[in-house]
Structures are given as C-alpha cells and as structure tokens.
Image (tube, helix red, strand yellow):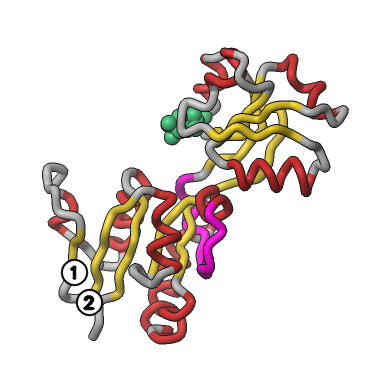
Amino acid sequence: MRYLTFALTKGRLAEQTMGLLEQLGISCEEMKDKRTRKLIFTNEEYGMRFFLAKGPDVPTYVEYGAADIGIVGKDTIMEENRKIYEVLDLGFGKCRMCVCGPESARGYLQNNQLIRVATKYPNIAKDYFYNQKNQNVELIKLNGSIELAPIVGLSEVIVDIVETGSTLRENGLGVLEEVCPLSARMVVNPVSMKMDNARITELIHRIKPLVSPVAQK
Ligand code: PRP
C-alpha cells in the first residue's frame, strides 16, 4: 500500500488536525516532540505520512501531487488559486477576511475613490475591490504586520485576517467591511482523489461527523 501523504500547515492548524486524527485512532508520536528537526513523519499502521509546510506552500504540494491531502486555511486556498479539490470545512481556525482601517477611511469605501490597499492577499483584495465592489484601487503587497500600513500612512485601508479583533483595537483600527468568513479546509489532489478514492472518501466520511456544527457544540 502506498503512503497517503498529508501536507499540514505548520502551527495551530497542524496541531488541531493531529488532534482530530487522534480521535480516529490515527496518531503520530514522533510529531509531538517539539525539539525534533525531522521534516516528515510516518504512521506505518495506517500507511500515512505527514509533513509540515508554510501555509501558502500547502496548495502547491497538493496541486503537484507531492501530497495527496492538504490542511490549509480558506484564505490561502483563495489566494493561491491552485487546481485542487476542497473537500471539507474542518470548522477550526475560524476567522474573517476584512477590509480594515481607521473609522475616518469608511467614506473612501463608499464613493469609489482611488485608494491604496495594503495586504498579504493581493488576489483576494483584487477580486473583492475589482469584481465585487467595482472600485479601482492601488494594491500594495506586504508580508506581515499589515495593520502598520494605515497607521504610518502607507495605505488608506488594509485587507487582512481578523480573529479576535485585538490587533485592530490596540492600534486604533476597526473592521470596515467583511470580505468573507474563513476556516481550515481539507484539500485533495485531483489525481489522488481518483486513484485512492476509497481511502480518501472513507477518511472524509470518518472526519465529517467530528467537525459538523452539531459535533462542535
Ligand atoms: C494575523 C493577522 C492579524 C492578526 C489578527 O497576523 O494578519 O494581524 O493575526 O488576529 P486578531 O484579530 O486575533 O488580533 P499574524 O499573527 O498571523 O502575523 P502577521 O502580522 O505577520 O501576518
């Protein structure tokens, strides 16, 4: 039996995914060692192997078939736009993609002004402003601490992830518009879905009841 390979987004999403698999009796002890420098972990009993990757790389591994299955945020799926199947909403990692800024910037979003928008997600921001709002904007790509941009005058607003809202609050900013809700998703390589259909669909069917809204209550 060939290994079913999982690409997991490093950090909380990977930990929560392994917690979910443990509920199905699938565990990977060597992954729990925080000091390990190993990159790939196997579970011989189930013929599975797991590796950790940066979020934006997960859809890439899955599209090329280097991983059969990926666990990644909806934000990254939308931004990367890879040829992969999104098969399951895992219900954790919940947050929102929002247009944020100081209250004084709200008006710029209402009367179609040419404004600057800083973001780590230029494709999502472009789709939102150009296709959904019909507003012409100048997009500025940043790689982190996006909230800085309107504070120091780099942009009027930002498009970014809001989870608790505390980063915004502590910096005198707020949510001006919501783009979409986000959460962790399971994605599958289209060829793997055909070749290993029985194993993959069985896994999806076993995980589904654990992550359905009723189960989460
Ligand atoms: C994310 C996001 C916000 C923050 C939102 O940043 O970009 O800055 O979390 O969370 P909150 O609503 O709970 O405050 P992350 O910590 O991933 O780091 P980054 O700024 O480097 O992207």
Q: Which residues are magenta?
A: 80-93
Residue 51 lies in what quarter of the image? bottom left
The answer to if 38 sits in the magenta stretch is no
Q: Is residue 39 left or right of residue 174?
A: left
Q: In front here: 167 or 159?
A: 159
Q: Residue at x 40, y 57 (%)?
A: 58
- Residue 145's place in the image compared with 27, above or below, is above
Q: In front here: 211 or 65?
A: 65
The answer to whether residue 217 is seen in the rendering is no
- Residue 153's place in the image compared with 89, above or below, is above
Residue 169 at x, y = what percent?
A: 56, 18
Q: Residue at x 17, y 76 (%)?
A: 45
SS type, badge 2: loop
Q: CA distance from mark 1 to mark 2?
A: 6 Å
- Residue 25's place in the image compared with 99, above or below, is below
Q: Is residue 40 left or right of residue 5?
A: left
Q: Is residue 153 left or right of residue 38?
A: right
Residue 27 at x, y = what percent?
A: 21, 63
Q: In front here: 127 or 32?
A: 127
Please report contact status of discs 1 and 2: CB closer than 8 Å, yes or no.
yes
Image quarter in which the N terminus is found: bottom left
Q: Which residue is mark 2?
A: 47
Q: Quick check: is the Cβ at mark 2 less than 8 Å away from ligand 1?
A: no
Q: Amino acid at mark 2?
A: Gly
Q: Amino acid at mark 1?
A: Asn
Image disc number at residue 43: 1
Residue 137 at x, y = what percent?
A: 74, 34
Q: Residue at x 41, y 79 (%)?
A: 192
Q: Is residue 9 left or right of residue 157?
A: left
Label 2: how many Cα within 10 Å (few below 14, some 14–19, many 20+): few
